[in-house]
Image (cartoon, rainbow, N blue to C red):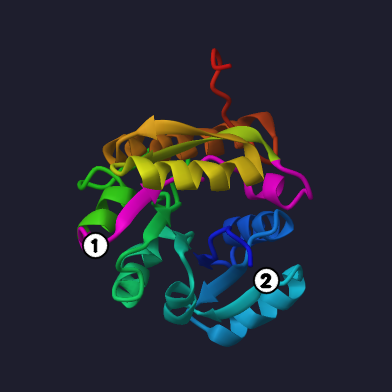
Amino acid sequence: MSSKPRIAILGGTGDLGSGLARCWAAAGYDVVIGSRSAEKAQDAAKQLGGGVRGDGNAEAAQAADIVVVAVPFASHESTLRDVKDAVQGKIVVDAVVPLVPPKVATVQLPKEGSAAQIAQALLGDGVRVVSAFHNVGATKLHSGDRANCDVLVFGDDKDARAAVIELANAVATRGIDGGVLANSAAAEALTSVLIGINRRYKVPGAGISITGLS
């Protein structure tokens, strides 16, 4: 039996979610993608292959050890409410960026501070929310190799951060401990900056790299 955690990706039919699913499955993780439509999730899982399964959001969350939320910001709170009971006692990785169309290249953080802080307040103390994967371009994840960028990981629980850093190491250059959950605002804001860079420099997925570390 594998010692690796089972991962559910809510919003797993989207570009980021499906890219993460593809990479983690290739790294030997048991992955189930969730969607509001179980049928849509199952169809997407078949296209990904690699043993990836699909189910409704609540069912996927219930079956997993770690739950990744990779839905659009407009669906963030409703998705969390739908799975609140299913994720109690688990790590929830919030990869949601508070983009506000049409000005997605302009930083527009919510009054609560960040999407991750919204998630923690909504899910309660029984859930360890960790924030990560905001600055990883989906194009990189679908390339068939690990993304050549660093992943900043934030959370108020040190052990939960360490678990998600291990997941980041499997899909990107490395995961880096960014400190407490409130610091997630920096990575969430940086996503809009990177979207603007992508447009101006005509590149598919600008990322970040932290220098000075061994």
Horizontally, is 81 left or right of 189 in the view? left
> Magenta segment, which residues?
122-146
Nearer to us: label 2 or label 1:
1
Q: Position of residue 57 (x, y in %)?
A: 46, 77
Name the residue carrying label 1.
126
Q: Residue at x 29, y 60 (%)?
A: 127
Is 40 placed left or right of 10 in the picture? Answer: right
Of residues 104 and 96, the one nearer the viewer is: 96
Does residue 98 appear anywhere in the picture? no
Q: Does residue 51 appear in the picture of this structure?
A: yes
Image location (x, y in percent) of residue 169: 60, 40
Which image quarter: residue 2? bottom right
Task: Identify the disc placed on residue 82.
Answer: none
User: Residue 123 in magenta?
Assistant: yes
Name the element at disc 1. loop
State the count of labels.
Answer: 2
